[in-house]
Image (cartoon, helix red, strand yellow):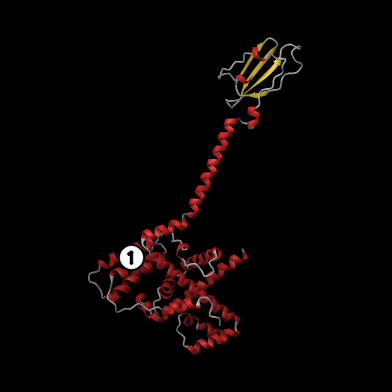
Amino acid sequence: MNTCEMTLLKLDDWLDGMLDESDRAAIRAHMAECEACRAAFCAAETLQANLCVLGAAADAIASTPRVQRRHVAISRATLWRIAAALVIAAGGFWAARLTMNAQRTGRGSANDAQRPVQLSPAHQVAALEVETSPRDDVRVSADGDVMAVRIKSSNPRVHIVVLYPTTPAASATPTPPADEKSKANI
Amino acid sequence: MDPGPNAALLASVRASPAPDATRPLDVGALRGRLVRFALKLVWNRDDAEEIVQEAFRVAFALPSRPPDAVLERWMLRTVANLAMNLRRRRRPEPLGAWIDPPATGSPQADAERVEALERLREAMDRLPDRQRLVLVMRTMEQMDYETIAATMELSVAAVRTHVHLARRRLAELMGERRGRETTA
């Protein structure tokens, strides 16, 4: 049996503090020269110390009154959950505001929805009678030389009115489709 | 050899007084000690308290009360057996709130230390029952080999062997884990 084997046989007694000073001095002297034994003893001592820390933690858990223990648990363990809930709530509130804004201004941008309908001056807009019955998706009406086609969109606040000249003299090209918010805009 | 950062802790553990077998039995103190012991085996306070409650129930059902020293050992052994036979365990207690912060005071060092202790606790669960029991009694309860032998009804040599095997196996388990983490 070489020195390393003899030294490692005393590892348990070393950890348990059962060696006399001469034995301890001999082990220290060997470990000063042998890196493997030094590493083995250091690892074993670290393991032993960690077991002691675990034992102390268990004693603390078992000895702490329930109320205080619950308080500690809340302050440590639930902190991240509370923070996550706050972040989620803030995100939900922000998303809800965005949705409400989008519904208020229609599907396009706010500028598109609020832009007044551009009509050709050649059309006699005031004389038009565009049906606004909510049950009809498409209504066509005409007055004089202008025909109006009203198309309801999925957004109840927006519909499309396309004006066509009924006589070639009124306009050479139809007015491009335009969003409008209500009949009052026409 | 450099004594290292663990030397002071080990010295304080070695200097702590051993349990006095001649003191009169204090049921409240005994219950507290049993709960602490059971907690080191099952790591859940509710489980530990239920085990101790059951041990007392069995003890009160004994036809005659044994001497205090014998009763204490008998209770320890009963608690150990109940803990080993516990089939459905509750979630283990988190360690983070119960570990003293290291001298560095760094949050990262804190987290790494708690993680290492959680790994050690898991590794202990993988030890054979008897090895785990004697290791807990020796290293966490600071019981001497003779008391452990009397409690577990084993020879002192057998207890020493179990402690030695448990330490070696635990070192292997922690080394394997470290090796896997290094290669991953």
Q: Is residue B33 above or below residue A159?
A: below
B46, B67: nearer the viewer: B46
Instruction: Give whichever of A171, B147 is nearer the camera.
Output: A171
Residue at 47% from the left image edge and 82% from the top image edge: A13
Q: Position of residue A21 (x, y in %)?
A: 48, 88
Measured as percent of width and height from the top left, residue B104 is found at 54, 69
**Name of the residue lying farthest toward the bottom:** A22
User: Crowdedness of circle 1 by 10 Å Cα count: few (<14), some, many (20+)?
Assistant: many
Is residue B18 at all visible to an observer of this figure? Answer: yes
Q: Quadrant of the N terminus of chain B?
A: bottom right
What residue type is disc 1 on? Val
Return the x and y of residue B150 as percentages of the image width and height.
Answer: 35, 78
**Vertical relation: B100 (above or below) A83:** below
Residue A160 rendering spot, x and y as whole percentages = 64, 22
Dividing the image into 4 quarters, which one contains the C terminus of chain B?
bottom right
* Letter of the chain that mark 1 sits on in the rendering: B
> Residue B109 falls in which quadrant of the image?
bottom right
Residue under the point 53% across and 42% down: A92
Q: Furthest-left residue in view?
A: B64
Q: Nearer the viewer, residue B13 or B166?
A: B13
Residue extending furthest top? A144
Q: Mark 1 highlights which residue?
A: B52
